[in-house]
Every structure is written in C-alpha cells, then in structure tokens.
Image (cartoon, rainbow, N blue to C red):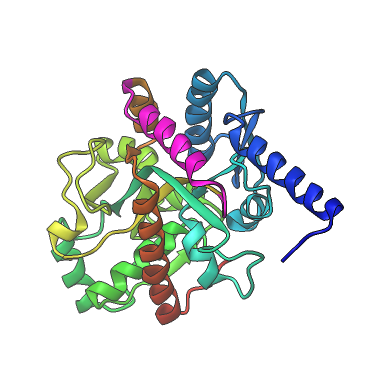
C-alpha cells in the first residue's frame, strides 16, 4: 500500500506526537482525586491522607475533589468519563460494587470503565446488641432469632447501605429473619439502638467502641475475615459461629479504563508505599480502618468477587436503595 506525500507526512507527525506523549513524565500536571462522598467522612480522610503523601513525592499538587451524590455514582461517573492519563483518579468505596444491583440503570460499566490501582483500607463493622437482648455470642443470637422469628429488629444507616447489607447477608447465611429499621444515617440509628428502640446493629467501629466500653452496648463480633487491631479481643463472625461470613466497608484507588499500565504501576507503587508508613497507618486506624495495600490485579479480582457476592445477596433479598 502506498500513501500520498501529505498522508505520509501526517502519519509521521502523529507518530512523533504519540512518542512525545508517551515520553512525558508522570505526573506532568496536578492530579485530581475524586471522592464520591461528602467531606469529613472516612472516604474523604483516606483520600486526603494519600493525596498529601503523593504531593510530597511527586512535586505536583494532588487535589481532592468531593463530588457526593447518588451513593457514589455522580463522582464515579466523572472519573469514568475523564481522560485516561492518570491525572484524574477515584477513591471508590463499597457502593461501587453494590450500586449495579441496587440501581435500575447505571451511567457507566463498573468493571470495564475503570482500571484498578490499589486497595487502600477496609473498615470492619461490629455486631452490637442493646444490653437488654439476652444473647452474649453469635451462636446465642442465631438461636434466639430462630426461636423467635421477626422478634428482633436491626437498625441501619438506610436501605441499601453497607450496614443494611451486612445484616441481610447475616440473615441469609444464618437462616434467620429479623425486622429491618432503616434510618437516615448511622448516627440516628446508633442513637435508637442506645435507647433500646432497636435490638441490634452492624455498627461503625469508631462510633460504637465508646459505648461498648461503657457497657451500654454488647459487642459480639466483627464482620471482617480477620480480627481487627482496633478490637483484637473480638472474634470475627466467621469464627464465632457463621463460617465464611465477611462484610466490610472497603476503599480503593481506581483510574479511568485504558490508563497506561506504566502509569497505573507508578501510582500503585507510591500508594502502597504510603500505606506502609507508620503515621498513615495510625491516621487510618483512628477511623477504625486497617490498611491493605494490593496490586492492581489483586484489586481487580476482589472487585469482581464483590460484584458477584453482593449481586446475589441483593437479588435474593430484594433489597433496594433509598
């Protein structure tokens, strides 16, 4: 095949431009980390902690951009449609894998429109009971719920929230039926649990620990696969009577799909290095989080597993988002 001189010149110019682009160091300008949640919460704190470290390492500003709404969909959609050059990143959280099953329509493809970079942290919940509930272990709670179907009720931060789905998974695996009482947030749910209006809750570790220590709430177990340093004496639900149970809030760094692998690997190296620093671990631990750096491939497999797991739970339970 032969080309005219103008066509050949144009192709040569394109090749030169492409080579020059590929040769540019990364980052070549400020990097934006989109947080699909309001400021001040765990997702925001984790993103700002990592962004600060990346700014120090790269000599370019790494800015956090809060874009809350629709359970994380608004901010995630911004990143999905951003240039795939590594200068726009996403601090995703658990709703990333539950939204596709909770929502009738999504503006992006959860698997194919994002490139995994690294897991950042997991935050286990803690199964807590009001002190009046006559159960002091997971096995006793399951026995009580089986003996009295629908007698126990549980609070959540809202229909489709992580606190709700943790309980739905527990019911399904334990073969029990309890009454769901959704609230507009974890704070009001915890207040009613403390007041005895509800029986139990899969609560936030940081907010429930003071009440566990005071004796107002009784903690049975944590929802993670392994015991957490935040409460090392508490067993996991899996080891306390429900093998295979795991339901944690997780946070991970993603990029738009088709971001060059060399850029992904560079970000991964910096993020995982930051997560191993003592002060970063301490900062995340203050929010009840365990740092869990990973490879891009490990994160990709985890997301696929979580999508399948929660999709099945949501379909079978009929759970809906608020």
Res 197 seen here: no
Q: Position of residue 102 (x, y in %)?
A: 54, 70
Percent x, y of residue 244: 20, 65
Residue drawn at x 43%, y 33% as measured from the top left:
271
Region rendered in magenta: 256-278
Q: Is residue 94 left or right of residue 321?
A: left
In the picture, the quarter occupied by the N terminus is bottom right
281 relative to 243, above or below: above
Residue 90 located within the stretch drawn in magenta: no
Residue toward you, 21 or 90? 21
| The furthest residue to the right | 6
Give the quadrant of residue 118.
Answer: top left
Q: Residue at x 41, y 59 (%)?
A: 303
Q: Residue at x 38, y 63 (%)?
A: 306
Q: Is residue 16 visible?
A: yes
Percent x, y for residue 80?
A: 63, 54
Q: Quadrant of the C terminus?
A: bottom right
Q: Is residue 141 above or below residue 79?
A: below
Comparing 195 with 60, the one in front is 60
């Amino acid at each position: 095949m032969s080309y005219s001189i103008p066509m050949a010149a144009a192709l040569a110019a394109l090749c030169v431009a492409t080579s020059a682009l590929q040769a540019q160091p990364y980052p070549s300008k400020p990097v934006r980390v989109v947080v699909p949640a309001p400021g001040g919460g765990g997702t925001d704190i984790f993103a700002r902690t990592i962004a600060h470290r990346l700014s120090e390492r790269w000599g370019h500003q790494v800015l956090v951009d809060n874009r809350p709404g629709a359970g994380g969909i608004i901010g995630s959609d911004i990143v999905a449609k951003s240039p795939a050059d590594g200068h726009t990143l996403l601090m995703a959280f658990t709703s990333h894998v539950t939204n596709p099953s909770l929502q009738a329509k999504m503006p992006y493809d959860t698997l194919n429109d994002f490139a995994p970079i690294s897991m950042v942290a997991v935050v286990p919940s803690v199964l807590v009971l009001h002190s009046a509930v006559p159960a002091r272990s997971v096995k006793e709670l399951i026995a009580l719920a089986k003996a009295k179907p629908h007698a126990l009720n549980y609070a959540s931060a809202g229909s489709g929230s992580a606190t709700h789905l943790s309980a739905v998974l527990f019911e399904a695996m334990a073969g029990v039926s309890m009454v769901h009482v959704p609230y507009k947030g974890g704070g009001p749910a915890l207040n009613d649990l403390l007041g005895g209006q509800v029986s139990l809750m899969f609560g936030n570790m940081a907010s429930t620990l003071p009440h566990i220590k005071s004796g107002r709430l009784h903690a049975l177990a944590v929802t993670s696969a392994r015991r957490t340093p935040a409460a090392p004496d508490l067993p996991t639900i899996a080891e306390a009577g429900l093998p295979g149970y795991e339901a944690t809030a997780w946070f991970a760094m993603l990029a738009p799909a088709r971001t060059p692998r060399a850029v992904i690997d560079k970000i991964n190296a910096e993020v995982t290095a930051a997560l191993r620093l003592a002060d970063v671990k301490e900062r995340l631990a203050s929010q009840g989080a365990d740092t869990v750096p990973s490879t891009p491939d490990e994160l990709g497999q985890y997301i696929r597993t979580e999508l399948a797991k929660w999709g099945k739970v949501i379909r079978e339970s009929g759970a809906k988002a608020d």
